[in-house]
Image (cartoon, grey):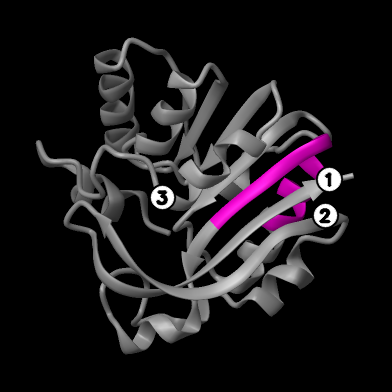
Amino acid sequence: MNPQFWDNRYATEDFVYGTAPNDFLRQCANYIPDGPVLCLGEGEGRNAVYLATRGYNVTALDQSAVGLAKAEKLAAEHGVSITTVATRLEEYPIDPEAWSAIVAIFLHLPPFLRREVHAAAAAGLHSGGVFILEAYAPGQVQHRTGGPVTNPEMLMSLDQLHGDLIGLEMEIGREVERDVIEGKGHTGRAAVVQVLARRG
């Protein structure tokens, strides 16, 4: 949760996690209704830019200004624009019923903050809006191909997410193993949890 750590990680010409969107997000994109989309912990922008190319009005949130500068560059290269906000998640108010979708891809937080952010995200969706998440599950400590494996409390299980996302109906909720190939940062077999949840 240190902005300087992420600024240093993103301070390279390469995109640490690649420029292609996350596979699970791509699978879920057709479920997103029209309207504004909020991407949490968006880093270098690959997912926000992808959604912008599909016509969504996207706000990308991250604590790293360096990562978001790369996100804006990537958006320009794709001929789209995104709104970027450099801030800590705990300092950003997610307005109730304001978003068509909220996206959290490999966003790992301390448990108390995870619960707070996920609850705010659930409340931040308007009727029919969706929350899309992929994250490393506890089994990732066996793979060590990405994620906070040295801080396993920041990994998350499907049971925990059921508890976090009160008021949403899970249309997809599963823990699986799959090959995650996303730049140098995520490469190899991984244990992940995937969620597509909708507000009624």
Magenta-highlighted residues: 118-133
Q: Quadrant of residue 76?
A: top left
Q: Which mark is residue 23?
A: 3
- The three-letter code of the residue at mark 1 reads Arg
Q: Is residue 129 magenta?
A: yes
Q: In the picture, which quadrant includes the N terminus?
A: bottom left
Q: Amino acid at mark 2?
A: Leu
Residue, x 53% and y 38% (percent of image)?
A: 39
Q: Is residue 195 magenta?
A: no
Q: Nearer the viewer, mark 3 or mark 2?
A: 3
Mark nearer the N terminus (3 vs 2): 3
Say left or right for 139 vs 116: left
Lower sequence index among marks 2 and 1: 2
Residue nearer the viewer, 200 or 146:
200
> Looking at the image, is mark 1 or mark 3 earlier in the sequence?
3
Residue, far top:
79
Front tag of 1 and 3: 3
* Image spot of residue 140 (x, y percent): 39, 81
- Residue at image mark 2: 168
Mark 2: give few (<14), some (14-19) or many (20+) Cα within 10 Å.
many
Marks 1 and 3, how far apart at CA: 23 Å
Residue indicated by mark 1: 199
Task: Give the answer, above or below, for where 116 lies relative to 193.
Answer: above
Label 2: which secondary element = strand
Element type where label 1 sits in the image: strand
Residue 32 figure quarter: top right
Q: Amino acid at mark 3?
A: Asp
Mark yes or no: residue 74 visible: yes
Residue drawn at (48%, 28%) of the image:
51
Q: Position of residue 67 (x, y in %)?
A: 30, 37
Estimate the spatial distance between the alpha carbons at disc 2 and disc 1, rounded to whole Å: 5 Å
* Residue at the bottom extreme of this rendering: 142
